[in-house]
Amino acid sequence: LLTLGKIMNSIKIITCSAVAGLLLASVPSLAQVSADGMGKIVPVELYACKFQEGKSNADLDKVIERWNEFSDDSDMDNYAAWLLTPFFYTSEQDFDILWLGAFRDGNAMGAGLQNWISNGQELAGAFATVVECAAHGAYSSAMYKAPSGGNAPESGFITLMDCKLNEGHRYADVKAAELKWADYLAKSGSKAAYYHWMPMFGGGDADFDYKVVFAYPDFEEVGSDVEKFANGGGRDASREIFGNIDECDDARVYVTRNIRSGKIRD
């Protein structure tokens, strides 16, 4: 990427959340990885929102408290959520916060969204008095590297990059390279978890093939990876592994705050 986007893209040329568990999951990391070296694919949703005039995080927290009570009453233990606040960004990102939600699987997504449509509209109105959300998208999240220790921190940082396949390459090429890169990261001592998000709903004419998401428990670990990649051999390793398979833009970096824990990955 090299602006954190491209010290893991240029360093990956790479990057990287899934919080998600971003998916940062909440169980031992070995249990999260399947036979092919990857974690189970889970659905995630992303809202991009701006505060209504005169409203702030304090107002949003009051509605979130009501939403968590609604979720408890609905036995919604298969959904986790985080608020993302921009840290490194440009003026093109015309929102104040992102809401990131992760479902355990497609069935949990279907049941959760139907319950929200059927029973959550009063709460939806309460949210609308605090934030205006101009975008709502859904993605399928594939985990290439589990969080260190297997547990998602209540706070941390994630980076998001948009990537496109170069002509002549398929996603199978990326998958093979990412699995090699995950092994390299683990051997280098990186604490990052990382994921690919494939567009599913709400994208319209999105100019990318997938998002690369890296998740970190703190900025010290971000800096540690930057140093490994820039001056510790990571740049050469990434070029050897990825070649010219894809191209990614600069990473946006967000501060994450967990607002609901749920069992997302086994």
Image (tube, rainbow, N blue to C red):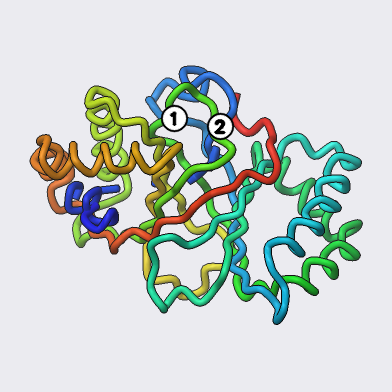
Q: Position of residue 171 (x, y in %)?
A: 32, 48
* Callout 2 secondary element: loop
Q: How many marks?
A: 2
Mark with earlier residue (2, 1): 2
The quadrant holding residue 165 is bottom left
Where is mark 1, residue-wise? 146
Q: CA distance from mark 2 to mark 1?
A: 8 Å
Badge 1 crowding class, 10 Å Cα cut-off, few under 14, some 14 to 19, many 20 or more, is: many
Where is mark 2, residue-wise? 25
119 on left or right of 233: right
**Is 106 or 33 nearer to us in this picture?**
33
115 on left or right of 251: right
Disc 1 marks a residue whose amino acid type is Ala
Give the vertical position of 252 relative to 175 (above or below). Answer: below
Give the vertical position of 98 relative to 14 (above or below). Answer: below
Badge 2 crowding class, 10 Å Cα cut-off, few under 14, some 14 to 19, many 20 or more, is: many
Q: Position of residue 118 (x, y in %)?
A: 89, 58
**Residue visible at 55% across and 73% down in the picture:** 95
**Is 191 or 62 nearer to us in this picture?**
62
Image quarter in which the C terminus is found: top right
Q: Position of residue 206 (x, y in %)?
A: 44, 71
The reply to whether dot 2 and dot 1 touch (C-beta < 8 Å) is yes
Q: Position of residue 5 (x, y in %)?
A: 28, 56
133 on left or right of 8: right
**Residue visible at 20% across and 47% down in the picture:** 12
**Is 162 or 253 nearer to us in this picture?**
253
Disc 2 marks a residue whose amino acid type is Ala
Q: Which mark is residue 194?
A: none
Give the vertical position of 29 relative to 134 (above or below). Answer: above
The quadrant holding residue 155 is top right
